[in-house]
Image (cartoon, rainbow, N blue to C red):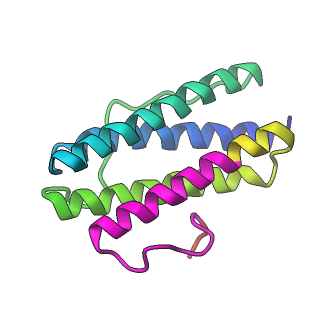
Amino acid sequence: MSSVLGERLAAALAAEYAAIFAYGRLGVLLDKAGKELARTVQEGHRVRRDALLVQLAALKVDPPAAQAGYAMPFPVTDKPSALKLAAYIEDRVAATWRAALAPAEGEVRKQVLAAYTDAAVRGAHWRRLAGLTPVTVTYPGRPA
């Protein structure tokens, strides 16, 4: 396993931490169905976080620590901004998983691809709910 892969998986872990925090922040601004979806998605990020912690330990890579708080990329004060934040977060998560694809091989590559795909699909879903266009993007996480 390459050190590059370990670094990129550690970056994915940091993105998962940030996503967990952001969903806690944005979920309270959504309607009942949105809150339920945000809780479900947040739990999915927790599962990925836990799996990454185990994987990094097996690779003997020191995992980054979660921060006590995370700065929001823009003011999040209402439902539209909460939906926009959810889409933004999933795009950032997708970017970290996308970066981990190149050095990954075998079973690890399958896991990375699944995480990347999940984030891309969630991002499209949140963009649709937020009324953002385009709803889907080519190669999510690719620098613009």
Instruction: Name the residue: 69% across, 50% down.
Output: 113
Q: Answer above or below: position of 128 versus 90.
A: below
Q: In the depicted view, which residue is nearer to us: 1 or 37?
A: 37
> Left or right: where does residue 116 sit relative to residue 15?
right
Q: Please provide percent x and percent y for residue 68.
A: 33, 30
Instruction: Name the residue: 41% across, 41% down.
Output: 18
Q: Answer above or below: position of 44 versus 137.
A: above
Q: Which residues are magenta?
A: 113-141
Judged from this view, the residue extending furthest toward the bottom is 133
Q: Please provide percent x and percent y for residue 35.
A: 22, 43
Q: Main secondary structure of the magenta part?
A: helix
For the N terminus, the image quarter is top right
Q: Answer above or below: position of 48 versus 112.
A: above
Q: Please provide percent x and percent y for residue 124.
A: 45, 65
For the C terminus, the image quarter is bottom right
> Left or right: where does residue 103 sit relative to residue 87?
right
Q: Answer above or below: position of 96 versus 87.
A: above
